[in-house]
Each structure stands twice: as C-alpha cells, then as structure tokens.
Image (spheres, grey):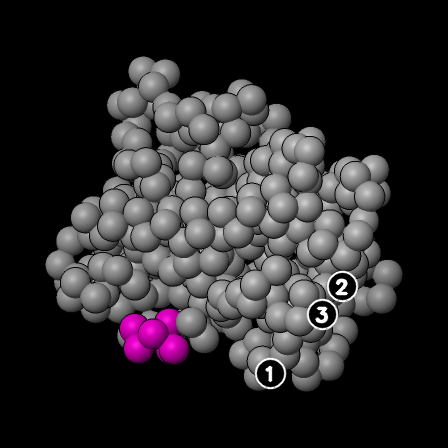
Amino acid sequence: MKTLSTTSLQVRDNQLWILDQQALPQQKNWLPAADVAELVAHIHALRVRGAPLIGLSASLLLALLAEQGFTRTALADALEVLRAARPTAVNLMNNLDRMRLALAQENYVAALRMEALNLIDEDKKLCDAIADAGAALVTPGSRLLTHCNTGGLATAGVGTALGVISRAFSQQKVTNVWVDETRPLLQGGRLTAWELGELGIPYQLICDSMAASLMAQKQVDAVWVGADRIAANGDVANKIGTYSLAVLAHYHQIPFYVAAPHTTLDPHCPNGAAIPIEQRAASEVTGVAGSFGSVQWAPEQARVHNPAFDVTPAALISGWVLDTGVITPEQVNAGIFLPR
C-alpha cells in the first residue's frame, strides 16, 4: 500500500502506525499496529479513539494484512474480531461492512486496498462538508462549548464538531471555546486543548462541572459535540457527560448541536435504549494514568460504575449536522431522517 498520513494514522513500509493519544500532549509517539491483537489493544486503551478513526484504522489494517498474504478465511476472522473491539461506535461496523463486501471480490487483495483508501478519502470529504454545514449555524462573536475530542485526532480530516469550530473560527465567528476536560480520561483537557492550541484558536479549559455556571452567566452561545452512534429516532450516544450538557443547554435555552458523518447514523437502531454502552475499567475513575505514570486517589476496594458513553434524547438536540446537511428537530419529529 502507498504511504499514507493523517493526523493520527500512518501507513509506511507496508505497516500501520497510530499516534498514541494516551501520551498526548506531553509526548507524540507513533506506535505500530502490526496485527489484529495489537490494534484491538490500542482501541481498548484509547490510544486509538474517535468513532471515525477506529473504523478507518481497522479497515487499513485489514487491507495491509491482505497484502501480507492472509487468506480470505483468516481475514474474515480478523474482521469479526475487529468488529467487536468497540461496540458503541457504529462507524466501525459500517466501515467493516464495506470491507466485507470487498473481501468477497475475486481479487480481494486489491479490492480491500482500494476500499480502505476510499474510506480515508471519503472521511476527509465528509469532515469538510460537516464543517461547512455547521459553520453556517455559528453566529459572529460566538463563545462555544465542546466536550471530549472531535478534531483531526479522531478522524482522517478536520474533524466533526471541532472541524465546525475551526471552520467558523476561520470565518471570524468564534471568540472563545470552552473545553470540558471530559472525565474520566481528560480527552478534552489533553487532546482538544492541544488541537485548539495547534490551530491558534482561543480556548479556556474547564472542569465538566463548571458548564452550568458558565451557562447561567450567559458565557456560552452554543454547545457542539460529536457522536459515536445516532439512532433512527435521533437519539445520540456520545462520550459520558454529553447528556448532562444537553440538559443544561435545554434549561438555559442554548442551542445544542451534534456534528457527525452520515456513517454514524444507524437506521437499524430504533432509539437510544437499543445502543450498547461499553463499561470501562474501574481504574479510570479511581485514579489517573498517562505518560507521567499513574496515581491512585480512591480507596483500593472502591466499587466503580464507569460507562464510556451516555445517550442524549433527540428532544434535547437543536440540530444534527451531517455531511449530507443539517437535520432539524421538525424533520426528526416528522420521521424524516437521512438514510445511510
């Protein structure tokens, strides 16, 4: 496969490399993902993260394994293992459905390579389309609040919600971005803050619990978040803490927008209750770990509830900004939602 590079993925010397997002921002380490077990481990540890990026990394690895001589049967087995790596992120399933079709072709090696590269190119275009559609909704002088990380680190392109913010900033519409630190893994504090700094966009980092106070003080003009899965009725699964922001925004009458590619829409999932929610390790809540080492602050035997995602009901969402256009609450209420 030809040499390829995005913010978080590289293909060089016919091997997949990933930017370790657990080490950012202190260290910028590229790690190999030479086989399925290695990539699954990276996904579970959130060294690879972001619904679009997870799907793209899995697709690239399958194509590279095919070029290395894996049989059709071995590739089919690898596909199923990768498919189970992140149950909430539907982009992974959608991408691998396309790779399965490529695997069925007579010349499956070439077909898998072409499909993986097409998915990368498409994601870049999807991100640009989302950014354009979303930026049109941002009013001049806006102070925007965002949660988790939705930029180039999580996609092959400019990102989803953060791509909107970046595009709106380039149009001189954004004066400040409030960045939720995003507990428990601090993906806002570590990743979004780093990306905004690299882009030269003014931001202020806040604890998740500070959002309500800012809204009450009229310091937030809109909330922009991404999505890991959008159900057929418009309910959205996203990083834990998103639902809280939606409730707060609704109470304070602040627009709450979801930005995502159409590949995040799951028309086979009727509502948020049907979305599988991943439970993660207790250690993410009882302490903190990173390039600096690890710290334990809770009692050793503390019982922990640690869902990776929550579900925001469609009734709390002001608009779904997809690459195919903006979906309004009126359209969702009327049962009009764009198919895949």
Mark 3 or 1 closer to N-term? 1
Spatial CA span between label 1 and label 2: 21 Å
Which secondary structure class fits the magenta region best? helix
Observer-nearest of 252 and 265? 265
Dot 3 amino acid type: Pro
One can see residue 25 in this view:
yes
187 relative position to 71: left or right: left
Observer-nearest of 49 and 206? 49
Residue identified by numbered label 3: 32
Of tags 1 and 2, the one toward the viewer is 2
Q: Is residue 113 above or below residue 103?
A: below
Q: Answer with the quarter of the image where residue 146 lies.
A: bottom left
Q: Secondary structure at mark 2?
A: loop
Residue identified by numbered label 2: 34
Residue 197: x %, y % from top left: 38, 77
Residue at the left extreme, as displayed: 140
Q: Magenta segment range?
A: 196-201
Residue 254: x %, y % from top left: 27, 46
Spatial CA span between label 2 and label 3: 6 Å
Residue depicted at x 34% and y 41%: 323
Dot 1 amino acid type: Gln
Spatial CA span between label 3 and label 1: 16 Å
Residue identified by numbered label 1: 27
Q: Secondary structure at mark 1?
A: loop
Mark 1 or 2 closer to N-term? 1
Residue at the front extreme, as displayed: 107
Dot 2 amino acid type: Ala
